[in-house]
Every structure is written in C-alpha cells, then in structure tokens.
Image (cartoon, rainbow, N blue to C red):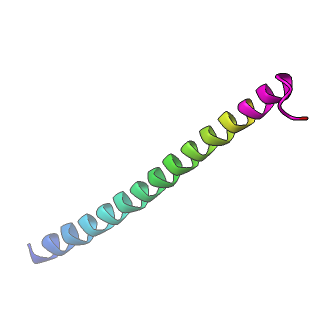
Amino acid sequence: MKKLNISLLVLAMIALSGCSVITGIFKAGVFVGILAIVIVIAIIIWIFSLFMGGGK
C-alpha cells in the first residue's frame, strides 16, 4: 500500500510539471501571436501610406 501511495505521488508530480510546461508554451504562443498581429497591422498601415503619398 505504501508503494502505491509513493507511485501516485510521483505520478502527480510528473503530471503537474507537465501542466506548467504547457502553460509556459501557451503564454509564449499568445505573446508571439500578439506580436505577429502588431507587425501585420504596421505593414498594412505602411503600404496604405505609400499609396496615399505619405512615403515621399
């Protein structure tokens, strides 16, 4: 019975550390997504300003 409790504890620790890794990946993904959107919007504004004559 004691081996079972230790096994469950080890399994829980592995599972929880995996959750923290996944959380970090999603946080990085959100940051990269926001950064990509900002860059795309900046490029669109730059192209629009070229057509309107603002790039001279």
Q: Which residues are magenta?
A: 45-55
Quarter containing the N terminus = bottom left
Q: Horizontally, is 50 left or right of 41 in the view?
A: right
Q: Is residue 12 above or below residue 33?
A: below
Quarter assignment of residue 5: bottom left
The residue at 58%/49% (across/down) is: 32
Q: Nearer the viewer, residue 34 or 28?
A: 34
Residue 53 is inside the magenta segment = yes
The residue at 85%/23% (across/down) is: 51
Q: Is residue 39 above or below residue 52?
A: below
Quarter assignment of residue 43: top right
Quarter containing the C terminus = top right
Q: Is residue 51 above or below residue 41?
A: above
The residue at 79%/29% (across/down) is: 49
SS majority, magenta = helix
Q: Nearer the viewer, residue 14 or 38?
A: 38
Residue 12 in percent (x, y) is at 24, 64
